[in-house]
Amino acid sequence: MCEAPVLWFNRPSREAWMDVLADSLRSLRLKTEVYGRLELSAPWGIKLDLGHPGFFHAISRGSCWLEVEGQRLALAAGDWVFILGGAPHALRDAPRTRTRPLPELYAETGAQCGGVLRHGGGGPQTTLISFSFGFTGTWLNRLLEGLPRVLHVKGDGVGATRGVEALIQFVAAEMEAGRPGHELVATRLADVLFIHALRTHVEAFPAEKGGWLRALEDAQLGRVLQQLHDRPKHPWTVEAMAKLASMSRSTFAARFQKVIGESPLTYLTHWRMHTAMQLMAEGDASLTAIAESVGYDTDSAFGKAFKRHAGRTPGEYRRQLRQREG
């Protein structure tokens, strides 16, 4: 299939909440696969079972049915859906229409990545804009694990959806025109769409149902998480975190474990290692400087913690990064 290369208070303030979330999104290395603009005429049916972590489908004209994980959703013009977890799914003009794998249709029609694919029986028209997303960055898993697998946003043309709809129409126009570089333009816009969709997903999700999200929304735990993310170098102790949360040490530790699923110091270590990995991937700072920036006084202590976390030494990890990039 065609691929495009890589992208306090009674409650924490919205800015603080989003700052911690932004730390996860900033570390995201996104790889977008642009399926293109699908011009479909009834009867038609497509299925996707490609194992990608995320899918995005927008209906710019007509209507269709989506089936995913036992759900059946009716989609209309202006609607878009965001599917997480690589779930196999199908789109079709009517509930009983037979489906075919999308890669098979590309091969059959000779359609190009990021362009227009035309398929169907000549009946009523539906236009889809479709992408899939792959990404690295294990920290994002904390967010994804707490979210529902399917987000359906109706195209009401108000609020946050207006911006997404404008992007969708721009992507559709680029694919239709087919001008030089349109694949790259579509890929970059798809990256933006992913962030918009993920942000909408988070904002629509009741935080009380998810561990990490619930912690971000919690007045006391959210305050601590923000400070851990902002200051990984600080010599944190459970006592210091509990004081920041205005709780006793034992109460804080128990609550943190219950909501997030791990101890405060384990969480801190994971964040420090994640930050160190990002610094190795994004620059040429020495390992000593990176160790100091995430709270380790010696290379030896940093190396031992890193190897327990990643299964390899910092030097080995950096060499593997450079080999993949080179």
Image (spheres, grey):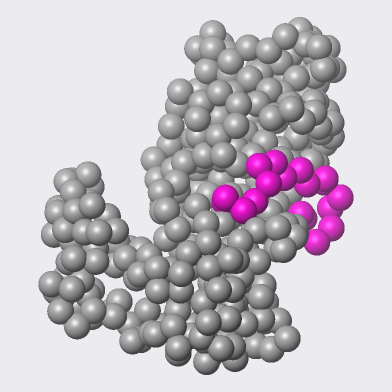
Residue at 43 percent of width and 37 percent of height: 4
Residue 230 quadrant: bottom left
Segment tinted magenta in the rendering: 144-163
The answer to whether residue 148 is left or right of residue 115 is right
Q: Residue furthest front?
A: 250
Quarter placement of the N terminus: top left
Spot occupied by residue 319 in the image (x, y as percentages of width and height): 14, 53
Question: Can residue 181 be seen from the camera position used here?
Answer: no
Let me know if residue 161 is in the magenta part: yes
Residue at 80 percent of width and 41 percent of height: 78
Up-down: is 65 above or below 236? Answer: above
The answer to whether residue 284 is left or right of residue 276 is left
Up-down: is 76 above or below 213? Answer: above
Q: How many marks?
A: 0
Up-down: is 88 above or below 310? Answer: above
Residue at 77 percent of width and 30 percent of height: 71
Residue at 79 percent of width and 41 percent of height: 79
Judging depth in this view, the residue of 311 and 89 nearest the camera is 311
Residue 277 quadrant: bottom left
The answer to whether residue 307 is left or right of residue 265 is left
Up-down: is 299 above or below 153? Answer: below
Spot occupied by residue 15 in the image (x, y as percentages of width and height): 63, 78
Spot occupied by residue 128 in the image (x, y as percentages of width and height): 70, 30
Judging depth in this view, the residue of 187 and 71 nearest the camera is 71
